[in-house]
């Protein structure tokens, strides 16, 4: 594991890509070409890492993660399954799904991360609508996708939740929280950031 100091302005993403850190992307149960393209560009701006598609770049959503009782997919089950499919040399890996995700204690989750296995997943299911149920503008949708992806990868890189509502590591209880926060880490989270 590599512990980086707070990035200075002259530190470009090249620094860690020279150290061989690559984030892999995988679409589960969907194509997600637009989101994969977006994340390939944006994550390389935020993290000092290269971003590539995993091999395979597409996997199904595992049927065993589906809960008939909740009509949603259990993200923890999905993550464990993903860790069995994506080899260790292609981690950290971020999965993108279109289905609705949940964990037992919550109505839904925008995503989940397993820092130990270095796998994470985000769902685009709840990122499309505005507050009155209409469709949001494409740029708002894209910003949400990027924030959720940075947040889950932040967990993979060792960060917990942050009390600063503008910090990307702030917990999103609703889409309002996601819209309020930025895609950036606050100063404190930057200091705690580790890349591995
Ligand atoms: Zn979180
Ligand atoms: Zn923070």
Image (tube, grey):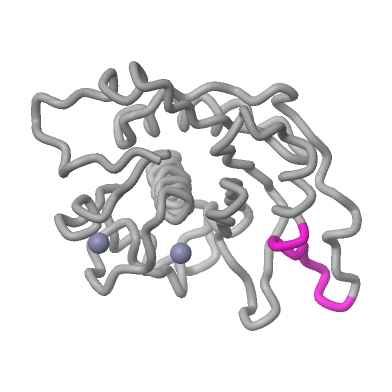
Q: Image point 21% across, 23% down: which residue?
A: 12
Quarter of image, res 102: bottom right
Can you tell me which quadrant of the image ligand 2 is in?
Answer: bottom left
Q: Is residue 39 above or below residue 123?
A: above
Q: Residue furthest left?
A: 9
Q: Position of residue 106 (x, y in %)?
A: 62, 79
Does the magenta portion include 68? no
Q: Is residue 23 above or below residue 194?
A: above
Q: Quadrant of the C terminus?
A: top left
Q: Image point 42% across, 68% down: which residue?
A: 172
Q: Is residue 167 left or right of residue 105?
A: left
Q: Image point 54% across, 52% down: which residue?
A: 128
Q: Quadrant of the N terminus?
A: top left
Q: Image point 55% across, 61% down: which residue?
A: 110
- Magenta residues span 69-77
Q: Position of residue 120 (x, y in %)?
A: 58, 49
Q: Position of residue 91 (x, y in %)?
A: 58, 35
Q: Position of residue 133 (x, y in %)?
A: 55, 65
Q: Is residue 28 left or right of residue 118?
A: right
């Amino acid at each position: 594991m590599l512990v980086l100091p707070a990035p200075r302005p002259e530190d470009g993403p090249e620094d860690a890509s020279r150290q061989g850190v690559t984030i892999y992307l995988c679409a589960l149960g969907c194509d997600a070409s637009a989101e994969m393209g977006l994340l390939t560009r944006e994550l390389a701006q935020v993290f000092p890492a290269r971003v590539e598609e995993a091999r395979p770049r597409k996997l199904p959503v595992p049927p065993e993660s589906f809960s008939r009782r909740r009509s949603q997919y259990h993200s923890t089950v999905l993550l464990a399954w993903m860790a069995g499919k994506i080899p260790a040399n292609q981690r950290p890996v971020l999965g993108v799904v279109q289905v609705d995700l949940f964990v037992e204690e919550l109505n839904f989750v925008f995503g989940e991360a397993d820092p130990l296995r270095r796998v994470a997943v985000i769902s685009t299911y709840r990122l499309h609508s505005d507050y009155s149920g209409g469709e949001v503008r494409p740029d708002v949708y894209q910003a949400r996708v990027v924030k959720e992806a940075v947040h889950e990868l932040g967990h993979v890189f060792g960060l917990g939740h942050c009390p600063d509502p503008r910090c990307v590591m702030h917990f999103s209880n609703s889409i309002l929280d996601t819209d309020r926060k930025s895609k950036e880490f606050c100063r404190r989270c930057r200091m705690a950031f580790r890349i591995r």
